[in-house]
């Protein structure tokens, strides 16, 4: 829902207050975390999927993974021209697809191995510049395909937190995440566009806190759960239904952004979410009628 909201608002207005901005170079914004929380949740879902099978190489498990990847790649083929401006570019869904297999494999090994992998990726981030390898900034969104590995710790952390949550040890995970964030913050400032390990660690902390809050205060709603279960469909609907407005902006204004006032952009974004939700519900209703 956050990714939907911030993407639409960013498309509709050029003069947004800080609280509505995201992907601003050299600045940390609340909207920067919606992608990382999306990845964190995906890690949890992969851990749940993996737990349903006693062995990693069960054919039904890999059929589920193949279906999941197929849907994501198909969705990316449709929306990357809108989200990145190029076919097959790195966007949120493509990033999720690229990290699915490594995360699933890591979900089948011990916790210690996962933590070693996470810290090794952080070490790699700080080592590569000394070897003459440029990580960022990149002209490609999210650092392009080579930047995907630096988001892997967030997805893997989602699998670890899922296990901790099931074992009722979430508070211990929260403490560990807090220490990690504090340590990495001494090395660099959290920055999404620079793919800094401190940003990834802070994202894991926020993901853990979000999960704890949902369980602690019983936050939930039928329409919220519906959007979560159909997140990929809602993501596609956002871009597809926005396509006429984007086309208008590019042809009439010679720009990809429209020029609404911030308050109007927020109102339209919320309305657009409602339209997409209604459209999705209508799609389900037609499908049920067809099966009858």
Image (cartoon, rainbow, N blue to C red):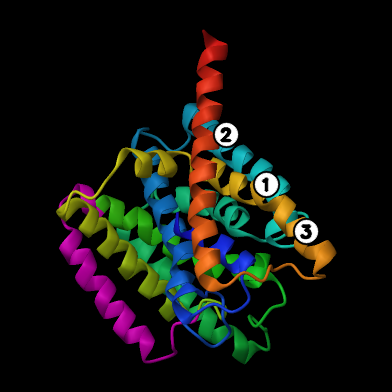
The CA span between labels 3 and 1 is 14 Å
Pinpoint residue 263: horizontal percent, then vertical percent. Answer: 50, 69
What residue is at 46 percent from the left and 48 percent from the top? 104
In the image: residue 245, left or right of residue 187:
right
In the image: residue 87, left or right of residue 207:
right
Q: Are marks 3 and 1 in contact (CB under 8 Å)?
A: no
Looking at the image, can residue 110 be seen? Answer: no
In the image: residue 267, left or right of residue 217:
right
Determine which residue is flagged by label 1.
240
- Give the crowd class for mark 2: few <14, some 14-19, many >=20 residues within 10 Å: few
Most foreground residue, 183 or 246: 246
Q: Is residue 178 magenta?
A: yes
Determine which residue is flagged by label 3.
248
| Quadrant of the rendering where the N terminus is positioned | bottom left
Residue 67 badge: 2
Q: Of marks 2 and 3, which one's residue comes earlier in the chain?
A: 2
Q: Is residue 287 above or below residue 20?
A: above
Pinpoint residue 33: horizontal percent, then vertical percent. Answer: 44, 69
Q: Of marks 1 and 2, which one's residue comes earlier in the chain?
A: 2
The secondary structure type at the circle numbered 1 is: helix
In the image: residue 59, left or right of residue 87:
left
Q: Is residue 50 magenta?
A: no
Looking at the image, can residue 219 be seen? Answer: yes
Report the span colored magenta: 164-191
The CA span between labels 1 and 2 is 22 Å
What residue is at 55 percent from the left and 36 percent from the top? 279
The secondary structure type at the circle numbered 3 is: helix
- Give the crowd class for mark 3: few <14, some 14-19, many >=20 residues within 10 Å: some
Pinpoint residue 44: horizontal percent, then vertical percent. Answer: 37, 50
Q: Quadrant of residue 173?
A: bottom left
What residue is at 36 percent from the left and 41 percent from the top? 225
- Give the crowd class for mark 1: few <14, some 14-19, many >=20 residues within 10 Å: some
């Amino acid at each position: 829902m956050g990714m939907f909201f911030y993407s639409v608002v960013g498309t509709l207005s050029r003069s947004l207050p800080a609280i509505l901005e995201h992907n601003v170079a050299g600045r940390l914004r609340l909207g920067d975390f919606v992608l990382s929380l999306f990845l964190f949740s995906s890690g949890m879902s992969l851990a749940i999927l993996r737990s349903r099978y006693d062995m990693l190489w069960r054919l039904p498990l890999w059929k589920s993974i193949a279906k999941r990847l197929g849907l994501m790649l198909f969705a990316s083929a449709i929306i990357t021209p809108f989200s990145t401006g190029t076919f097959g570019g790195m966007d949120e869904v493509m990033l999720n697809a690229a990290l699915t297999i490594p995360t699933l494999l890591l979900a089948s090994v011990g916790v210690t191995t996962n933590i070693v992998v996470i810290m090794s990726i952080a070490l790699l981030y700080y080592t590569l510049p000394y070897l003459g390898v440029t990580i960022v900034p990149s002209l490609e969104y999210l650092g392009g395909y080579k930047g995907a590995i630096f988001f892997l710790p967030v997805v893997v952390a989602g699998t670890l937190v899922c296990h901790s949550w099931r074992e009722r040890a979430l508070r211990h995970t929260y403490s560990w995440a807090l220490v990690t964030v504090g340590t990495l913050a001494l090395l660099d400032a959290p920055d999404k566009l620079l793919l800094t390990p401190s940003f990834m660690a802070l994202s894991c902390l926020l993901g853990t806190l979000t999960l704890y809050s949902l369980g602690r205060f019983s936050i939930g709603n039928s329409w919220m759960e519906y959007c979560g279960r159909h997140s990929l469909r809602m993501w596609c609907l956002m871009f597809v239904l926005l396509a006429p407005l984007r086309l208008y902006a590019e042809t009439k204004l010679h720009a990809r952004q429209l020029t609404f006032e911030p308050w109007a952009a927020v109102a339209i974004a919320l309305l657009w979410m409602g339209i997409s939700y209604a459209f999705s519900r209508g799609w389900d209703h037609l499908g049920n009628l067809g099966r009858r």
